[in-house]
Amino acid sequence: MRISGFSSGLDIDQIVKDLMKAKRVPLDKLTQQKTTLEWQREQFRDINIKLVDFRNNKLFNYGLEGSINAKQVNITGNTTAVSAKATSSAVAGTITVEVDALATAASVRSSNGGGIGAVDTSQTLSALKGAGTINYTADGSGNVTFTVNGASITLNETTDTLASMAAAINGNSTANANAFVDSETGKMSITSKTTGAGNITFAGDLLDNFDMTVSTAGTDANVIINGIATTRKTNTFTENGVEITLNAAGGAEASLNVVSNTDKIVDTIKSFIKDYNDVFDSVNNKINEERDRKYPPLTADQRADMKEDEIRLWEEKAKSGLLRNDSTLSKLISDARLASITSVTVGGTQVELASLGIVTGTWEQRGKLVIQDEAKLRAAIEADPDQVMKFFTQPTAETDPTLKVLPTNPDNGLFNRLTNVVMTALDELATKAGTIKYSTDINAAFLPTSNIGEKLTSIDSRVADLNRRLSLIETRYFKQFTAMEVAMNKYNAQAGSLFGASN
């Protein structure tokens, strides 16, 4: 029981609250330390997300041969006969193509006088049989079986229709055919899904209803490639990494000239530089952000006395500079710069970014990559596209695990170097802040065993201890004031008795 200051006239609750303010200072400092660590951890996670995306998505995609070693096909001669597209494995050079005949698909259809006449293709097979439209033999369960190209297909006469019969053929991968039933004539056709020599085969009395006696064999394409007469089962095929499509037979030959797609390679390099600069700008901004220690995290009492806008502005300043000069991020920047300015040995030749017209920018730009001379970059690509590709993507032959991941590994391509540099930073961030090395989820949980996680656990334990101690102190204060009130009330009562007796 607490007795308010009836006898003393004191506001005991306020007095105790004021006394506890001083006692709560260590608790407030711990809470502010905890908030600062949580803010730091969240900022590390923001950086971690950018690094994961840069490494696992952007660098990976730029490293694909089709991006940095892009080829294109220029067609001359009979440009209507063929079309072509270079794949990532296309070999530079010329391919001549002369088309004698296109590949065709096998088919079979009802004869001119065949078919079952106009029919509702949505009626069940049993209904059509009952009406005398079709005839077939079903087993004891009402199942009707037939084959197309060796694929056995079973229908049920009470549930299936001519429409579902066609769908069953179309959906059977072994049959590899498209079937069609025309409701106006009751005629049916089956066409192979692929071209090439061969015929459509079928069996079954259900299909016999349609008198499919007009058969057209599929044929292979006849083509002359670089002077060699040959055949292909399809009109689209790949030679020397070039996807060739035959469009028309006859006429003169077409020449397919495979060359590097300089524009696409330059665009890929520009995209890489933009992404590189965006990521490392974010990191540079954090490690160079000014810290103003006059703005610690607000306590609960301070927040209660401030407006929302005031709280927001205060916390913007309080969160500034929390990662200033962080060792992990500073090392990341340093290693990325080393990886960029160190030459790559390609076939015995030292290739540098500068030889491709790319520089690291001025001191004020903090290591940004800049295409200083695009004409020089284009000339290098056109002169030796393979060398340019290997500068960026060449895998290292180094087997020593320590030397292999160094940013200055001489035979490792730039993309691989940066991949290793970023992975090293992600490992350190996971240890330091508990971030997830492969996650871009802004809500991903932190690893509790990280350095910051362990500090937070320790602070939580100390906060709990302090709260228990403060609770005891507050209780003691109230007991003391309660005792004072009881004593004063007693003395007042005694004094009242004395004064009453004297009167």
Image (tube, helix red, strand yellow):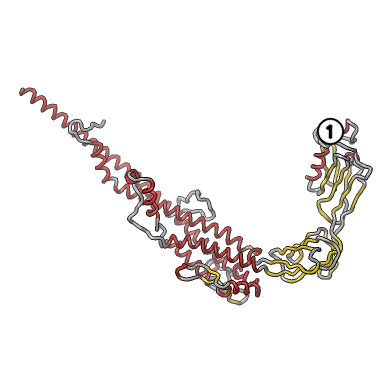
Q: Please state which amino acid type lies under the numbered disc 1.
A: Gly
Q: How many marks?
A: 1
* Disc 1, SS: loop
Q: Quarter holding the C terminus?
A: top left
Q: Which residue occupies 50% across, 59% down? A: 426
Q: Which of 134/308 is in front?
A: 308
Q: Is residue 391 left or right of residue 50?
A: right
- Mark 1 is surrounded, within 10 Å at the Cα level, by few (under 14), some (14 to 19) or many (20 or more) other residues, namely few
- The answer to whether 127 is drawn above or below residue 150 in the figure is above
Q: Is residue 125 left or right of residue 68?
A: right
* Residue 358, percent from left and from top: 55, 71
Quarter of the view holding residue 236: bottom right
**Image quadrant in which the N terminus is located:** top left
Q: Nearer the viewer, residue 117 or 301?
A: 117
Q: Quadrant of residue 292?
A: bottom left
Image position, residue 56 (x, y; %): 57, 58
Q: In the displayed structure, would residue 35 be above or below residue 75?
A: above
At 16% across and 32% down in the image, what residue appears?
A: 488
How far from the left and from the top, in percent, is residue 483?
20, 33
Q: Looking at this rendering, what residue extends furthest in the right direction?
A: 113
Residue on which the image places disc 1: 142
238 lies left or right of 38: right
- Tell me the residue at 78%/61% (across/down): 245
- Residue 90 locus on image (x, y percent): 71, 66
